[in-house]
């Protein structure tokens, strides 16, 4: 996998203010901001670089107000790191291709993994099945 590296200024020029705050500054969007994602088959990609991150088949309704998935499409594309902000320990998840902050993973998801990848919708784009495309 080829790493995508850009300056903060390049990211700022590419992204909306909210997308920049979330993906580059480790922010969090307001809950229920992205309940409009399509329901058909497809792939959720990284807003910043277009990497395939999650499949529609692994998406589930968690009741949290953020898009939730029980597994990444390709585990190599979603990295983890410890997040000790807000006086708690959580596991942050990020895009391994461009280091965009995506959200967090929790051990309270459904089978088969028992994981809940709680992802900021602003960090994702939906690509319907059969559509091609990748950013760089």
Image: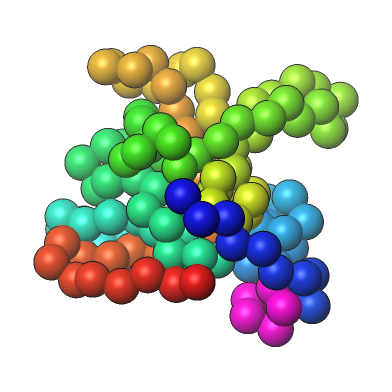
Q: Tell me if residue 107 can be seen.
A: yes
Q: Name above or below for residue 92 compared with residue 12.
A: above
- Of residues 48 and 119, the one drawn nearer to the viewer in this rendering: 48
Magenta extent: 10-15
At x 40%, y 48%, the residue is 53
The residue positioned 57% from the left and 55% from the top of the image is 3
Give the farthest residue toward the bottom.
Answer: 13
Q: Residue at x 75, y 21 (%)?
A: 89
* Residue 120 visible, this angle: no
View extreme (right): residue: 87
Where is residue 7 drawn, in percent x and y? 77, 70
Asked whether residue 11 is drawn in magenta, I would say yes
Image x and y of residue 87, in percent? 86, 25
Q: Name the chief secondary structure element in magenta.
A: helix
| Relative to 61, 21 lies left or right | right
Q: Quadrant of residue 25?
A: bottom right
Query: Is 18 on the left or on the right of 124, as rendered?
Result: right
Which sits in the foreground, 122 or 31?
Answer: 122
Q: How many marks?
A: 0
Q: Residue furthest front?
A: 2
Residue 61 is situated, as x and y percent measured from the top left of the image, at 34, 38
Is 76 colored magenta in this rendering?
Answer: no
Left or right, residue 13 beside residue 57: right
Question: Which color scheme does this rendered protein use?
Answer: rainbow
Q: Is residue 16 above or below residue 62?
A: below
Examine the rendered structure and indicate whether residue 122 appears above or below residue 117.
Answer: below
């Amino acid at each position: 996998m080829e790493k995508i590296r850009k300056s903060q200024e390049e990211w700022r020029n590419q992204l909306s203010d909210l997308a920049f705050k979330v993906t580059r500054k480790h922010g969090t969007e307001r809950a229920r901001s992205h309940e409009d994602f399509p329901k058909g088959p497809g792939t959720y990609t990284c807003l910043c670089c277009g990497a395939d991150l999650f499949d529609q088949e692994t998406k589930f309704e968690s009741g949290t107000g953020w898009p939730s998935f029980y597994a990444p499409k390709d585990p190599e594309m979603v990295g983890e790191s410890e997040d000790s902000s807000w006086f708690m320990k959580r596991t942050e998840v990020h895009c391994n291709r461009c280091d965009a902050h995506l959200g967090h993973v929790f051990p309270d998801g459904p089978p088969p993994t028992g994981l809940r990848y709680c992802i900021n919708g602003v960090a994702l784009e939906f690509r319907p099945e059969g559509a091609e495309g990748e950013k760089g």
